[in-house]
Image (tube, helix red, strand yellow):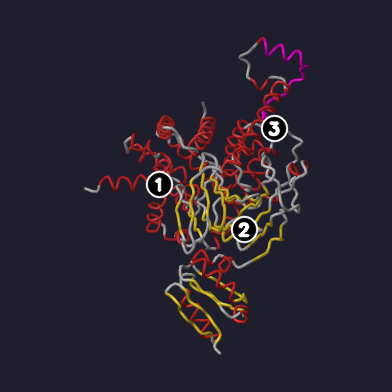
């Protein structure tokens, strides 16, 4: 075998190993892989190149600029690109298949290969549909009470910051990482693992991410997705099999044909609100530092009524704030505060609004207007 | 004796084989690409020095840890032996370096060309995976095909991209007789 042929074979093998190792290889597989690595430096060089291909694909950002895909050409057919099709009529090809069972299957007539793949496609749809709803009933539950914040690191290295009064279920499988946000809000710093997309789901809205940081907040009437880093895709999951979209702006040929539309993509410093009916407020740009300050234990207010600010503080603390005077409650407040320091906030209100502070017991601070 | 403890931490660290991989890739961006085959030779020799059983535990972590070590050592050596080439060493520390950015742009343009050379269906599968974040079974469902077809498409695409990226970015690769 000449050198370039040998190198080509090494490329093939390296690619195959890359995918084997990407999904929890068995002991036997790891042994064979180790032996393969130790067979030749060419194998190592090829493995490094495949890693480079992986990196190039992860870094690539111009996917939307590529020519749109028209599904006229069936992937199964495209997969046979190196096969020369022979102008056999079907009866001949059926016969030849029967006569020579050891013949490579790629030479069978298209009809024979397409029927099983259609069945497989249907089965896949069912499987995906089932998997989609699965996490709402199973998985590890993590929740926080009022005044409790919680940070956890998942087995894949991803981190989640839970705001008070938040409940989520975590379910990691071999080809996906799913988190179901039941209520509250949380910030996700996702460790990149392209083989297992990271998915955060609320009722009808799912957010997918590769390596990125974003927050999902479940409000009574809406879901708010805020991206701090990287890129996420937001889907409407009412149709489980092909996550249908919220916005119709982008062209996504295969979906549109089925009456759905494409997901909405968000990048850093963008925020999207999806309300209960699935209506999307247009993506707007925000300062994610401000919008996600809560994840650092900060509360940011901008011309918000004191009543709103107080309600926020009360979610974060055992010490509760009360505002007795409705006029005071309606006054706007602007600033950044430590969520865990209601006393400082009370002192600030006392200072700027001339409010009177009283503590009836250790757990309640009452704000009132001075007479 | 806290050897078990140390060992456990080491295991944890190795389990995250992606972090050695990242390190390796980061350095790869800065070390002259033509050195890759020499680096592979060096990694090969080092792999032979380890117990097989040890590598088997976390082969990918070992591989990329060694590769990034080799790259790091070579960049140190290069600092002393080829001072006029040390400009790329600075890039090891500074990601925002304009040359690094230019290299990245070039890589992206290369990737785009390489992607355009793929069959559209294969390209679509890569897009669904890397842009929309779908797993293989989900891609199969979306495109109404089987997971096996998707898997084969990925294998082929990677091999094909490796050829194209080589031509674009690595030049012609010389494999000496080993």
Q: Same chain, marks 1 and 3?
A: no
Residue A350 screen position, x and y as percent: 51, 84
Residue B119 vs residue B148, the one in the foreground? B148
Q: Could you tell me which secondary element the residue under label 2 belongs to?
A: strand
- Identified at 40% across, 53% down, the residue is B72
Spatial separation of the CA atoms under disc 2 and disc 3: 37 Å
Is residue A95 a member of the stretch shown in magenta? yes
Residue B55 screen position, x and y as percent: 36, 38
- Is residue A337 shown left or right of residue B161? left
The boundaries of the magenta stretch are A79-98
Q: Same chain, marks 2 and 3?
A: yes
Vertical placement of residue A43 versus A269, above or below: above
Query: Looking at the image, can residue B114 be seen?
Result: no
Task: Tell me the mark number nearer the camera, choosing from 2 and 1.
Answer: 2
Spatial separation of the CA atoms under disc 2 and disc 1: 37 Å
Residue B55 vs residue A234, the one in the foreground? A234
- Which of the numbered marks, if any, corresponds to residue A225? 2
Spatial separation of the CA atoms under disc 1 and disc 3: 38 Å
Name the chain under label 3. Answer: A
Q: Residue furthest front?
A: A360
Residue A60 vs residue A268, the one in the foreground? A268
- Identified at 74% across, 41% down, the residue is A254
Disc 2 to disc 3: CB gap under 8 Å: no
Vertical placement of residue A146 versus A158, above or below: below
Judging by the rendered image, the residue that carries numbered circle 3 is A78
Q: Could you tell me which secondary element the residue under label 3 belongs to?
A: helix
Image quarter of the C terminus of chain B: top left
Q: Same chain, marks 2 and 1?
A: no
Residue B160 vs residue A216, the one in the foreground? A216
- Which of the numbered marks, if any, corresponds to residue B65? 1
- Is residue A269 shown left or right of residue B21? right
């Amino acid at each position: 075998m000449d050198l370039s042929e040998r190198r080509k074979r090494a490329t093939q093998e390296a690619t195959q190993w890359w995918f084997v190792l990407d999904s929890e290889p068995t002991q036997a597989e790891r042994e064979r892989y180790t032996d393969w690595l130790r067979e030749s430096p060419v194998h190592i060089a090829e493995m490094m190149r495949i890693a480079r291909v992986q990196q190039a694909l992860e870094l690539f950002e111009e996917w939307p600029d590529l020519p749109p895909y028209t599904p006229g050409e069936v992937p199964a057919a495209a997969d046979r690109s190196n096969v020369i099709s022979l102008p056999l009529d079907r009866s001949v090809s059926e016969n030849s298949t029967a006569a020579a069972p050891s013949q490579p299957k790629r030479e069978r007539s298209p009809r024979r290969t397409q029927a099983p793949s259609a069945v497989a496609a249907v089965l896949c749809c069912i499987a995906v549909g089932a998997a989609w709803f699965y996490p709402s009933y199973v998985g590890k539950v993590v929740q926080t009470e009022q005044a409790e914040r919680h940070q956890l690191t998942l087995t894949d290295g991803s981190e989640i910051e839970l705001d008070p009064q938040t409940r989520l279920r975590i379910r990691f499988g071999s080809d996906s990482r799913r988190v179901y946000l039941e209520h509250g809000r949380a910030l996700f710093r996702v460790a990149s693992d392209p083989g297992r997309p990271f998915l955060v789901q609320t009722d009808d809205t799912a957010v997918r991410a590769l390596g990125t940081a974003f927050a999902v907040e479940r409000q009574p009437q809406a879901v708010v997705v805020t991206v701090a880093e990287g890129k996420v895709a937001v889907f409407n999951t009412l149709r489980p099999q092909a996550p249908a979209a919220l916005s119709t702006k982008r062209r996504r040929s295969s979906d549109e044909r089925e009456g759905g539309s494409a997901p909405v993509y968000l990048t850093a410093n963008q925020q999207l609100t999806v309300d209960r009916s699935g209506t999307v407020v247009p993506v707007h740009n925000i300062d994610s530092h401000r919008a996600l300050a809560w994840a650092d234990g900060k509360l940011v207010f901008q011309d918000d009524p004191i009543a709103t600010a107080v309600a926020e503080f009360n979610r974060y603390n055992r010490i509760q704030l009360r505002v007795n005077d409705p006029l005071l409650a309606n006054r706007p407040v602007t600033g950044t505060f430590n969520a865990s320091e209601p006393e400082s906030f009370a002192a600030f209100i006392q200072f700027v609004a001339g409010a009177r502070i009283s503590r009836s017991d250790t757990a309640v601070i009452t704000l009132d207007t001075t007479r | 004796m806290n050897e078990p403890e140390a060992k456990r931490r080491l295991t944890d660290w190795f389990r995250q084989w992606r972090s050695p991989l990242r390190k390796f890739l980061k350095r790869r961006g800065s070390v002259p690409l033509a050195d890759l085959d020499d680096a592979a030779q060096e990694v090969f020799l080092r792999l032979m020095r380890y117990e097989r059983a040890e590598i088997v535990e976390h082969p990918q972590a070992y591989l990329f840890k060694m590769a990034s070590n080799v790259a790091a050592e070579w960049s140190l050596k290069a600092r002393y032996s080829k001072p006029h080439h040390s400009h790329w060493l600075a890039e090891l520390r500074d990601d925002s370096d304009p040359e690094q950015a230019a290299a990245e742009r070039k890589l992206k343009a290369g990737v785009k060309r390489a992607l355009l050379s793929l069959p559209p269906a294969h390209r679509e599968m890569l897009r669904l995976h890397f842009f929309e974040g779908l797993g293989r079974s989900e891609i199969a469902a979306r495109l109404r095909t089987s997971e096996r077809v998707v898997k084969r498409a990925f294998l082929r695409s990677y091999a094909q991209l490796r050829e194209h990226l080589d031509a674009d970015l690595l030049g012609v690769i010389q494999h000496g007789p080993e």
